[in-house]
Image (tube, rainbow, N blue to C red):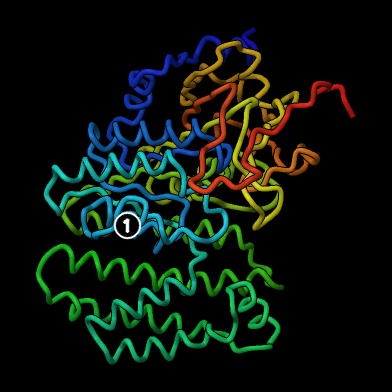
Amino acid sequence: MTTPLDCVCDAATRLDGSIDDYDRLLDQVGERGCVLLGEASHGTREFYRMRAEITRRLIAEKGFEAVAVEADWPDALRLSRHARHDSDDEPIEAFGDFQRFPRWMWRNHEVRDFIAWLRQYNAERPAQSRVGFHGMDLYSLHRSAEAVIAYLEGVDPEQARIARESYACFDHADDPFRYGHDATFGISQSCADGAVAMLAALLNNADRYLRADGRRATDEQFYAEQNARVVTNAETYYRAMFGSRVDTWNLRDGHMTDTLAELRRHLRSQGGQGKIVVWAHNSHLGDARATEMGWGRQQHNVGQWVRERFGEEETLLVGFTTHTGYVSAARDWDGPVEHRWVRPGLENSYERLFHDSGLDRFYLPLDSEHVAPLLEPRLERAIGVIYRPETERLSHYFQASLPRQFDAVFHIDETSAVEPFEKGELWRPEVVPETYPFGV
């Protein structure tokens, strides 16, 4: 009888650090138009680097037309303009809008190197077929509102005045969390109606605004529409954080999925195929129906909804895992980034199983009957922007059936921390206790 360990050893392909490491993945992609590349943490260098290498090949060899990432729309848009030669920003200046916690997720050397490659790649292509870099998240309520007003000031000054009046409702709170609290408990009025009205006005007036010729006008209208969607959905999200029965996780992942759908529609309207590479955490991109998120908490995610909306034959979900190493993460929300040691994978986890294979670094396709021994649920680790090893099992592990969650997985047994632009005094390797794992 084949054991899970035998299965891994038989089905996996060891990685040797060459560009050929991704040949099997590209074969698995085939003609699919949506490839989702995950990460087991938001601060692991190898995950960023490998996603960038895979994405370069998908763009150059498979004709992918956009990269969508777990970042705010206006922040990523500034990078996209730089990469597509639509701005005069210097390379580091293009990262200037990534100012909220956690900045190291995007202000790091691996992303910088990918954007530099993308800009060079786009320089050799006509403007209408240049590849963009887009954010899917919804936290940028105020900045997206400002972007909508700025767009309207150039095409419809009267509508810009109406937008300023509608969005002024948000100015009663100094941050979105405060707005959500005050609107929920009646301390200030809800801004929902005004936000929805502005999105509707943008959509209704699109033909009039697009009288200017060329793709750039169409792109700018789309960017403004998406910022208006962010305002509308962020308003709902921040209110739902205080007292609503609506799951904010579902609201956020629903917005990210809608963003992908709108981006596909936009690319196709411009004569493209709508082929998108997605970068986000494993917890967003692995099918939630195969994890305790879906089993017990009735939570959905991007991976599940993309499979359902775009079709499984059109999508490929790829996870990334590690056993130990280092990670860039904070101890608490809004805290400074630190260079932290990742404890080895727990017993009965996929991470420990992969470590026990002795393969070190490998690619494991999960779309065949040969991986049936891996279907039985095991623990799987997830480190976000915060790492709390003192509550490792509770804070960072969940049950999952990996072959149902992903179509393939990359495992790197020992990983390193992604290097932020701004390291700070706490970004230094954490000392590994000499007595681990026996010390108290």
The percent coordinates of residue 88 (x first, y second) are: 24, 59
Q: Is residue 435 above or below residue 115?
A: above
The residue located at (27%, 50%) in the rendering is: 83
Q: Quadrant of residue 174?
A: bottom right
> Above or below — where is 220 with respect to 187?
above
Horizontal relation, residue 160 to residue 86: left or right: right
- Image quadrant holding the N terminus, namely top right
- In which quadrant will I find the C terminus? top right
Percent x, y of residue 178: 64, 76
Q: Is residue 231 left or right of residue 439?
A: left
Image x and y of residue 362, in percent: 49, 18
Dot 1 lies on which element?
helix
Residue labelled with disc 1: 263
Q: Residue furthest top?
A: 1
Which quadrant of the structure image shows residue 51? top left
User: In the orientation shown, which residue stands out farthest toward the front?
Assistant: 425
Task: Pick whichever, 145 or 368, lies toward us.
Answer: 145
Number of dots carrying numbers: 1
Please provide percent x and percent y for residue 62: 24, 34
**Residue at figure coordinates x 46%, y 34% from the top left:** 318
Q: Quick one: label 1, few (<14), some, or many (20+) residues within 10 Å? A: many
Identify the residue at image location x=57%, y=85%.
Answer: 190
Q: Report the amino acid beneath label 1.
A: Leu
Q: Which residue is drawn at the image coordinates 46% and 84% (left, top)? A: 167
